[in-house]
Image: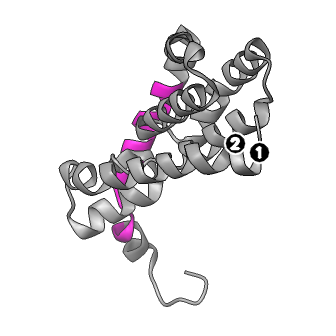
Amino acid sequence: LLFKTLTMEQAYRAIEWRAIFLVAAVLPVGMAMERTGAALLMANTVTAVAGDLGNYAILGALVVLASLLSQGLDGAPAVVLLAPVVIGTAEGLGISARPLMMGVSLAASAAFMTPFSHKANLLVMGAGGYRSSDYLKVGTPLTLVVLLIIVFLVPVFCPF
């Protein structure tokens, strides 16, 4: 627009409106999960189940939860929702919160199974003509590999 290589009408036609409306529809879901306590309940359940199995199990459970939350939310809200739970869990277990927070932060970015997990996925979906099932087929194995790497490597750099 600045260099007059594109008209305003051409710019409006180039916008992927489905992606914009989908992002706008997903954001209130994150707010609703936070306000109703659903995200906190999920996190508490996972930590109660995995807490007795050891540090790697609790890290794995929180990493999986962060990744699952970020499949439908953006990564940042997932981390914000889980941060108080992670810190409380670490204090309760008597371990450092650093590896748990690092794992949750990295896992929130490992959201490859849905098109609405990241805005770039939505843009590519419209332009490439992909379906949600395409993301599930390719993204599930990729997500699992990344999560395993996170669980085993984070404690190497940030010990419990």
Q: Is residue 90 magenta?
A: no
Q: Quarter of the image holding residue 90?
A: top right
**x and y percent of residue 96 in the render?**
80, 29
**x and y percent of residue 155 in the render?**
69, 43
Query: Is 159 on the left or on the right of 1, as rendered?
Result: right
Query: Is 68 on the left or on the right of 139, as rendered?
Result: right
Residue 112 visible in the snapshot:
yes
Find disc 2 in the rendering and name its residue. Answer: 102
**x and y percent of residue 4 in the render?**
53, 89
Q: Which mark is residue 158?
A: 1
**x and y percent of residue 73 in the render?**
48, 36
Mark 1 / mark 2, whichever is N-terminal: 2
Q: Quadrant of the N terminus?
A: bottom right
Front residue of this view, candidates 6 and 73 = 73
Q: Quarter of the image holding residue 160?
A: top right
Q: Which stretch appears magenta?
A: 13-30
Residue located 38% across and 46% down the image: 116
